[in-house]
Image (cartoon, grey):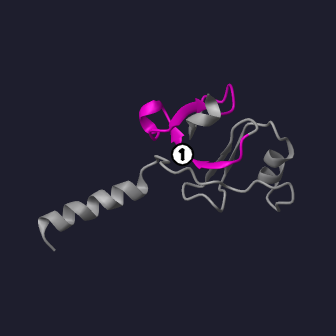
Amino acid sequence: MTYLDNVKLVVVALALTTGCLTEPHSCALGTDSPDPAIAQCAADDHATCVVRSHPECRGDVCVKWRANPGVCSVACVDQAGCGEHESCVEVVLGSQESHCVPSAYVD
């Protein structure tokens, strides 16, 4: 493998492991879920919640922001930790924990 091939491999690996959600992936939140956290989050259409260890999310976190569908997300400290069309928001007020959500959800 050449040096350039190694660089390409590292870039691809980093792209696959970074938190940005250039294409947010939806995650199902149903009240009939056997997981109580998922069922509880789904029960209120206008709830804002974070479901950890969601089976459909690569980063294990599914965020439901207000009346919008759930999306797979990652934690963030500031806007730099999110993708171009995302916003870093404190999903559950007072939790001091922020996640990237589609900017269209916030506007």
Q: Residue at x 64, y 35 (%)?
A: 105
**Amino acid marked by disc 1:** Val
Residue wearing tag 1: 74
Mark 1 burial class by Cα count in 10 Å: few <14, some 14-19, many 20+:
many
Q: Residue at x 49, y 38 (%)?
A: 85
Q: Residue at x 60, y 35 (%)?
A: 104
84 relative to 1 in the view: left or right: right
Q: Is residue 57 above or below residue 76?
A: below
Mark 1 element type: loop
99 relative to 52 in the view: left or right: left
For residue 73: magenta? yes
Quadrant of the drawing holding the N terminus? bottom left
Q: Is residue 37 above or below residue 65?
A: below
- Residue 75 location, x and y as percent? 54, 41
Q: Residue at x 48, y 32 (%)?
A: 77
| Residue farthest bottom in this picture | 1
| Residue farthest top in this picture | 94
What span is colored magenta in the figure?
68-96
- Residue 80 location, x and y as percent? 41, 33
Q: Is residue 99 above or below residue 55?
A: above
- Residue 52 location, x and y as percent? 66, 50
91 relative to 99 in the view: left or right: right
**Marker count (numbered):** 1
